[in-house]
Amino acid sequence: MYDEVDSLKFSINIGNDLMAVANGRLANIEKKKDNTNTYHWKVSKHINNYGISFNIGNYAQWSDDT
């Protein structure tokens, strides 16, 4: 209905020893000189402001190529 925006951009700045994940498409990771990274996301579909979520942690990244 009318409580949804048609698109949204948001950013989170955290220490470079952590990783941030969120809904939307990760647009960019900006590496800063102060040992932090700023993660920038964009949501291109309709979304409620209260539907945005993010998690910050010490995640491991892996893939399965089978």
Image (cartoon, grey):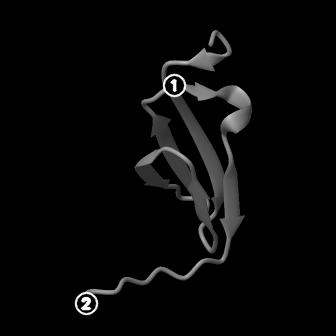
In the rendered image, the residue lying farthest to the front is 1
Question: How many marks overall?
Answer: 2
Foreground: 43 or 40?
A: 43
Q: Circle 2 is placed at which residue position? A: 66
Q: Circle 2 sits in a helix, a strand or a loop, which is it?
A: loop
Q: Distance between the residues labelled 1 and 2?
A: 34 Å
Compared to residue 36, the image places residue 43 above or below, namely: above
Compared across the picture, whether 37 is left or right of 54 comes to left
Residue located at (60% from left, 77% from top):
59
Q: Residue 43: x percent and y percent?
A: 48, 35
Compared across the picture, whether 57 is left or right of 22 comes to right
Residue type at numbered disc 2: Thr
Q: Circle 1 is placed at which residue position? A: 46
In the rendered image, the residue lying farthest to the bottom is 66
Residue type at numbered disc 1: His
Position of the N terminus by quadrant: top right
In the rendered image, the residue lying farthest to the left is 66
Compared across the picture, whether 58 is left or right of 8 comes to right
Q: Residue 46: x percent and y percent?
A: 51, 25
Q: How crowded is mark 2: few (under 14 residues within 10 Å), some or many (20 or more)?
A: few
Compared to residue 25, the image places residue 6 above or below, namely: above
Residue located at (52% from left, 31% from top):
9
Compared to residue 61, the image places residue 14 above or below, namely: above
Residue located at (37% from left, 83% from top):
63
In the rendered image, the residue lying farthest to the top is 2
Foreground: 30 or 35?
A: 30
Position of the C terminus by quadrant: bottom left
Q: Residue 23: x percent and y percent?
A: 56, 48
Q: In which quarter of the image is residue 57?
A: bottom right
> Considering only order in the chain, which callout, 2 or 1, is on the residue closer to the N terminus?
1
Foreground: 14 or 23?
A: 23
Q: Residue 39: x percent and y percent?
A: 53, 51
